Image (tube, helix red, strand yellow):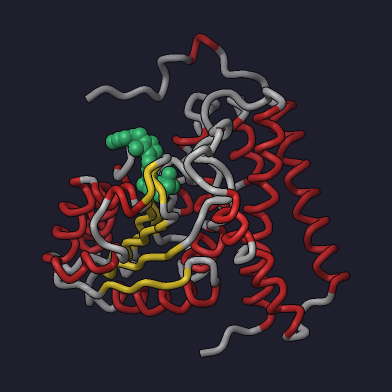
Amino acid sequence: MELDREQRVGLLKTMLTIRNFELKLAELFAAGKVPGFVHLYAGQEAVAAGVCANLRRDDYITSTHRGHGHCIAKGGDLRRMMAELYGRAAGYCKGKGGSMHIADLDIGILGANGIVGGGLAIAPGAGLSARLRGTDQVVVCFFGDGASNQSTFHEGINMASIWRLPVIFVCENNLYGISTPQSRHQNIRDVSDRARAYGIPGVTVDGNDVIAVYEATREAVRRARAGEGPTLLECKTYRHRGHFEGDPMSYRTKEEMEEWRRRDPVERFWGKLREMRLLTETDYAELDRQIRAQIDEAIRYAEESPLPDPAEMMEDVYAF
Ligand SMILES: Cc1ncc(C[n+]2csc(CCOP(=O)(O)OP(=O)(O)O)c2C)c(N)n1
Ligand SMILES: [Mg+2]
């Protein structure tokens, strides 16, 4: 089934929203407006956009420390996201969580995770819940190449495979875990090879090609909804920025970064749409302008919100 114009432009819009949001956030962070840590998603937009375009509002995702893109692609509210990043009371976690704790249960976002591999333990549980409630909801578990060495990866995928849970495990292989290249943290090139050990399909796609990601996810979602069980989908991609904002990036060469910038997922897809005559330069400029205006509005919303009241410090805090 071919995607129509509206669907293609929708994919570009999601990617461009993530790109603009992240680059604006980089500026705000450098200006000292955003406290804490931020790990930006710029460069990996095709993964979040291509995957989430296959999901319904009531499907679930689990996210990571690099989670803004997942949240935006699943329909997260830019204003509440920005307010959370600013640590303000109007934020998703009332300003008490920050970048790595954004969640929105109303639209199936089960949360970002500061714990690498944390989502791999949560996703099978959400899949089991869907099964027990008799729904056909599916769960997407986003995680990185580094996380694929965590015990939760093996336990989570094994559990999901034996119970045929409706989970799509999406590995965003951006070739690094902090400063460690993939070749030094695992002895395989394709993380999807590991799927064989659990008796499930393993697929690797170009994670900078939004259509390739979209199509591979469509099949994985079809399988999951039909009760055929999980898939491990690896998307090869690259982060444009450091591991965190402020990372000097001494572990990567300029040549490597330039090479990947030539494969920029947003530029590439916009170029395709222009070639297909689905979008003109004017349309693109207008789309970009609207997105920037929405982000500026989110910043205004965040800046107008008060800081959380210190008296509420212990509210919404759980201990087990
Ligand atoms: C359990 C745990 N171990 C270590 C860390 C420190 N840490 C934060 S991000 C990261 C690397 C994650 O790499 P990857 O999964 O490839 O994700 P990427 O940052 O490339 O998106 C590590 C080791 C952590 N947050 N949690
Ligand atoms: Mg990585």
Left or right: residue 160 compared with residue 75: left
**Which residue shows up at 42% across the image and 40% down it?**
179
In the rendered image, the vertical position of residue 26 relative to residue 317, given as above or below: below
Drawn side of residue 184 relative to residue 161, left or right: right
Report the image quarter containing ligand 1. Answer: top left
Rendered residue at 62%/63% (across/down) = 264
Residue 124 picture location, percent across and down: 23, 55
- Residue ID at (44%, 55%): 174
Q: In which quarter of the image is residue 191?
A: bottom left
Can residue 220 be seen by looking at this rendering?
yes
Q: Which corner quadrant of the image does residue 161 belong to? A: bottom left
Q: Can residue 113 be seen in this view?
A: no
Q: Which residue lies furthest to the right in this view?
A: 282
User: Which of the two residues, 257 or 50, is positioned nearer the viewer here?
Assistant: 257
The foreground one among 218 and 170 is: 170
Is residue 171 depicted above or below 36 in this figure?
A: below
- Give x and y (percent) for residue 212: 49, 76
Q: Quadrant of the C terminus?
A: top left
